[in-house]
Image: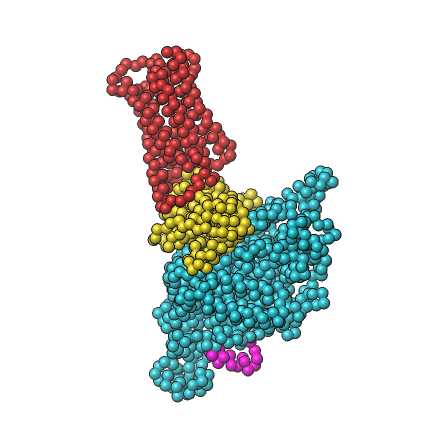
Chain colours: A red, B yellow, C cyan
Amino acid sequence: MFNSSIGRKLIMALSGVFLIVFLTQHLVINLTSLIPDNGKVFNFISHFMGNNPVVQFILQPILILGVMIHFIMGMYLEVLNRRSRQTSYVVYSGKSGASWASRNMIISGLVILSFLIMHFYDFWVPEMVYKYVEFNPLDENRYFHELQEKFYKGGVVKLFLYCVSFVLLGLHLSHGFSSSLQSMGITRGPIKIATKFFAIIVPAGFIIIASFHYFITTINH
Amino acid sequence: MKLNLKIWRQKNKDSKGKVHDYELDGVEEDMSFLEMLDFLNNKLLNEGQEPVAFDHDCREGICGSCSLFINGVAHGPERGTTTCQLHMRKFKDGETVYVEPFRAKAFPVIKDLIVDRSSFDRIQQAGAYISVNTSGNTQDANTIPIPKHNADEAFNAATCIGCGACVASCKNSSAMLFTSAKVSQFSLLPQGQVERESRVLNMVNQMDLEGFGACTNTGACEAQCPKGISVKNIARMNREYLLASVKK
Amino acid sequence: MDNGLKMFSINELAEFLNVSKKTIRRHIASGKIESTKVGGVHRISMNSINSFLNINKDIAQVDANINKELLRKALTNDAHKKNLFPFESRVPEGKMEDKWNNHKRKINLVSPANKRLIDVIVVGTGLAGASASATLAELGYNVKSFCFQDSSRRAHSIAAQGGINAAKNYQGDGDSVYRLFYDTVKGGDYRSREANVHRLAEVSTNIIDQCVAQGVPFARDYGGLLDNRSFGGVLVSRTFYAKGQTGQQLLLGAYSAMNRQVNRGKIKMYARHEMLELVIVGGKARGIIARNLITGKLERHSAHAVVIASGGYGNVFFLSTNAMGSNVTAAWKIHKKGAYFANPCFTQIHPTCIPVSGENQSKLTLMSESLRNDGRIWVPKKKEDVKKILEKKLKPTDIDESDRDYYLERRYPAFGNLVPRDVASRAAKERCDAGYGVNKTGEAVYLDFQSAILRYGKEQAYSKGLDVKNNSLVEKLGKEIIKQKYGNLFEMYEKITDENPYETPMMIYPAVHYTMGGVWVDYNLMTTVPGCYAIGEANFSDHGANRLGASALMQGLADGYFVLPYTIGDYLSSDIRTGKISIDTKEFEIAEKEALRKLSFFIDNKGSKPVDYFHKKLGRIMWDKCGMSRNKLELKDAILEIKKLKKDFYKNVFVPGELYDYNEELAKAGRVADFIELGELFARDALEREESCGGHFREEHQTKEGEALRDDENFNFVSAWEFKGSESNPMLHKEKLIFDSVELKSRSYK
């Protein structure tokens, strides 16, 4: 089954939906950083996520695996699909009937991947070093502060990179979410509209969070 | 009117083709696109040259023979129209018009604008039928009532003319719309239930073997399909295929 | 009658071949003529004579027709003496309604184990060809199926719009097999073979069952049962349909049945192949020479029987509603090898087509006859109005009701706009010839939906309780109804003409659409060449001089699914021990060389005019002189002109490119060459038939009111033409038509 074109699409769809679920919970957690309680709730959840063994040693690897499957399968399909047209058109009007987002999932996908690397470098790598290389003592209240510091230090350039990535994430989602449902054979009209809504809300949320922390810290300094 | 035609010429499947320029004067608005090509060919023949080869037959938009990629779009700029029903009034005087064959690995060029679409036949041969013999003793046609909605939906899927515009327009050269139209037709009818699972498995398998790309749901196929076959059929085929695979 | 069984004595053979007895003895001695001694006397079979004649002729000089002709003369000597039709129609004895069943019961069968030893070639994959291929393969024969299109699914049956008749009587309106039979015979103006038509009506119901079982999505009502519509010239609703695409859905059904057999390995499909010669071995059709249209190579294909299902020859008119590639070549090749061609002049001219718009027009588009249910046909009463319309000073909608001539309603008050196709077509021509044509070519009349729009609109307004006097509202409601009924046709019309038929009347004109004439076949659908069959539009048998709407699909599928697969067994049962037919024989070599010679001729002929030039000229002659109405003078003229055109064609035709390559011009040249020859026979047939019947209207034979005048006393026969060589005139044979079950009446639609 997974050797077939539809099977491969199912893998893309399932891994995509899984990442969408992750994205949603990531956004929800991050939104708590906007609560004006000096990071109390955010710190609490972050500490739980960062130190709960189930999250750390089961969910985290699964997530990384999900990202890798989605990425590798995406690349593989892209190569196969390109091969299925050996001579390209002299004139090809891609826009006839297909949105930019749907035709350029590979571009938005690669931008998101680059962002992911940057994001890992910003947050995940220091966190791993903090916990598993330097074996620093547990500190339940450091997360909110670290978050704000990162955005302040990154400056406007980083903020810009984040925002651009989120916009592309939005485009990726705007096609990817409904496409994954189509690949699984789901075509109810309202669901499709909901996915488009989701594709706007989620990236917008991230943009607001990033901007908020950047401006707050910049003003405070 | 006058046109600058840029037409793909290719001697045979092994040779390399390229775009040739033709200036054509005296094109009338009432001509169909293919009549415009006839007109060009007549001119070429009178000059002792070989005419441009292109597939065409019924010229009523139903046989699915015509297959031109005009200015980057399958069957040209008018939606819901095959090349043979496209008329020159849709073009401007002095316009440059690119004419290319439908391109896909599974549609190799035979000559000029003619491609080999036998891969479509092979997909159909893999299972697009109901195994019933012509005995003359089949049950009466009205024995099984079919809800009008299902009958209509099956009919809509069955109106596919097999031209290949879906493959040509798809950035992945995917044949999912074509294959799904037939799978849908039979899965919606009671007569198609017996072979429902083997049919979709075999047809998808053949589709993959032919070297078509995978669907990424861009929707270009539906937009450029001259018969407006819906991508909902693709979702239906995905569903049918996945269920059949699980049951297998 | 088996040609192979007739035995000659040496005397008879010497006389027949016009050689001395000594020569015959010498050939027998040398073994070139095979002979059997019966009671000490040499007896020579037909088969051995035929193979002797084929081998002994210099290849270049061979015109296999001569052999055929000689042989037939000898064979049919007795028949000629008695002045009878030389072939039997093989209509079974018995009561009309029992004939087919009795025949099926008595027919020879081939056992399943033997069927797999037998090959059958089917040329053409339309409704008849595809259904025959599928069924023959299902039965166990090895089928080789040929079509010139890139896929068997593209045959022109696909373009049929309206529907398919069947005597199901689902509507309970009194339909029956007999009524369908009667309507078809009457509609055909009593020039079809009664028994064949009855069989057609009998199997019509099976067709619908079969197609539904195959998954053909016919239109259904809200109860989920099959829907019917009514169609021109009959009083019941018996037409099954799938929107405006019935032909497509039926063909795809037959195509799927074929695909099933391709998948089983029982059909070998040869797409993009064109049949160029029939190969006769020992007096029997044993194979074909086909050209692979991609590589240009000639291929030999052998079989125990050859079935021609290559459709009609409407394209002899150049402009017709047939597909661009539709051609007569396969049928014509078998005609030249001995198959009689029947009633070539019976052509149906369909009244509702989109008129010709200009010189560069390549084909005509038909719009379903159903439009005449609601459209009213008219031309202006005054010539000055016509003039103003042409000068664009007046719009048709500006012409007052009293200045319009609804000529069908005027002439035929009972049937009005719903008269049969031939009558409607001729009436349009009459008005246009009189100078009332409403487009620049002078060949168009209006088909107006305005009164239907208002009628439906008012009905809607009433039923919805809206203001009936509000004209714009009524019009809007009416247009919605018209859109529901004819939306796709209106859209098509607008695409082609760029005029909105909701706002301005459509312009229509008759166009060539279907040919009732075709290869002569007996009750078993076998031609006069043993082992060679013709089915569907390619044969002549079921529609007489005029075909009723929705009957073409019925006949194609009846022949392919339910008739041929059984009747062919009768012939093939004697072939179970024949074994594979070799393609390495002299007969195949000669046929291949002949095909090659013709093709090379075109390539080597360094003429100056493209093929289409000649085809268009031929079309013009046919349309002007053998079209909707014909007369002696013009028909004679047409014959001369076609002869002249033929000379010009062979002298000046230019075919570029190479023989062994994809070369559409070369393929076209071969087809046009055959059309030219057919055109001449067509005109000759029209000239011979000194009566008016169905689609054949002779101006000399009409009533005072200008209606067709049939002559049952002198012309109640099928004209079956025998080819006598390219340089001599064909010979007419008459198969007398006998009507036991139907009384001959004159058709009146007044």
Q: Is-magenta flag for residue C73?
A: yes
Give the x, y percent position of residue C404: 71, 53
Q: Which residue is painted at 40% across and 49% down in the image?
A: B19
Q: Which residue is painted at 48% across and 33% down in the image?
A: A192
Give the x, y percent position of residue C144: 42, 61
- C609 or C711: nearer the viewer: C609
Q: Which residue is painted at 40% across and 50% down in the image?
A: B20
The image quadrant that residue B147 belongs to is top right
- C5 or C103: nearer the viewer: C5
The image quadrant that residue C10 belongs to is bottom left
Left or right of C368 in this view: C57: left
Give the x, y percent position of residue C588: 38, 70
Q: Quadrant of the N terminus of chain A?
A: top left
Q: Quadrant of the C terminus of chain A?
A: top left
The image quadrant that residue A214 belongs to is top left
Q: Main secondary structure of the magenta part?
A: helix
Give the x, y percent position of residue C382: 72, 55
Residue range highlighted in magenta: C70-85
Q: Is residue B244 visible?
A: no
Left or right of B137 in this view: C117: left
The relative height of residue C353 versus residue A118 in the rendered view (above or below) is below
The relative height of residue C355 versus residue C43 in the rendered view (above or below) is above
Q: Which residue is painted at 48% across and 59% down in the image?
A: C325
Left or right of C500 in this view: B54: left
Q: Is-magenta flag for residue A164?
A: no
Left or right of A76 in this view: A188: right
